[in-house]
Image: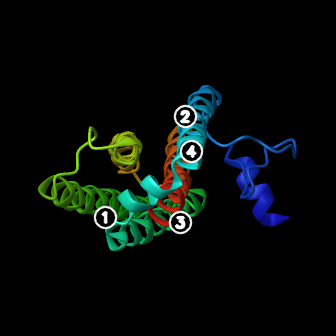
Amino acid sequence: MKARSTAASMGVAAPGHHTDSGRLRVPGESALWLFLFGDILLFSVIFVNYMVNRGQSPAAFAESRAHLNQMYGLINTIVMLTSSWLVASAVAMARQGRSDQVRRLLYGAVACAIVFAVVKFFEYREKLQLGFTPMSDAFFSYYFIVTGIHLLHVMLGAGMLLYVAMLYRKPGRNEGSMLVLESGASFWHLVDLIWIFVFALIYLV
């Protein structure tokens, strides 16, 4: 009761995204969720189209997929999961008013995004050196398009997290900064979730 009263007196929702009235609150800016749902719809359409085309030419898709280096995908999966843990931890630290920890955790997540991009660069370079391009066949068209769009999301998300980290240069809690952090965290977790589907559908299945 004391912790909840303290949180309420500071105008900050307690963990679990409850408002002072006790009702659940959607984290982040409401307008951001329209963008997130749009992203979900975009990737859903791409994934469905991919599965339909793969179902029509399973042998050709399997032959092309055999040229992928799954280690690149596995490394980036570990990187993305680590970054999501760092972002979730940053949100938890923000609710405790530990701005210094928030910055460190977000910088760690941004570093993960950079590692992801570097790994993707080497992966793309390997494919191009082997002669595979978006024009090679249907599989590699999907491969470059899906992973390319996702990489853009990673870079956008990293920029958002870096911006949020700058907002937490001052100690203590800040309700406005918390809202921006929740928005950035929601976007980043979606980017992570999308990558899990990309890894499963493109690299494994």
Residue 56 - label: 4
Q: Secondary structure at mark 3?
A: helix
Q: Quadrant of the C terminus?
A: bottom right
Q: CA distance from mark 4 to mark 1?
A: 20 Å
Which quadrant would residue 48 be assigned to in this image?
top right
The disc, 4 or 2, on the residue closer to the chain's N-terminal end is: 2
Residue 67 - label: 1
Q: CA distance from mark 3 to mark 1?
A: 37 Å
134 or 32, nearer to the observer? 134
From the top left corner, tell me how far across and down residue 169 is, in percent: 35, 51
Q: Tell me the mark number nearer the camera, choosing from 4 and 2.
A: 4
From the top left corner, tell me how far across and down residue 17 is, in percent: 73, 50
Which residue is tagged 2?
39
Vertical comparison of 19 with 91: above or below: above
What is the three-letter code of the residue carrying label 1? Answer: His
Q: CA distance from mark 3 to mark 4?
A: 43 Å
Q: Tell me the mark number nearer the camera, choosing from 4 and 1.
A: 4
The disc, 3 or 1, on the residue closer to the chain's N-terminal end is: 1
Q: Quadrant of the N terminus?
A: bottom right
Labels 1 and 2 touching (C-beta < 8 A): no
Which quadrant would residue 76 be assigned to in this image?
bottom left
Labels 3 and 1 touching (C-beta < 8 A): no
Residue 89 - label: 3
From the top left corner, tell me how far across and down residue 100 is, in percent: 39, 63
Q: Secondary structure at mark 2?
A: helix
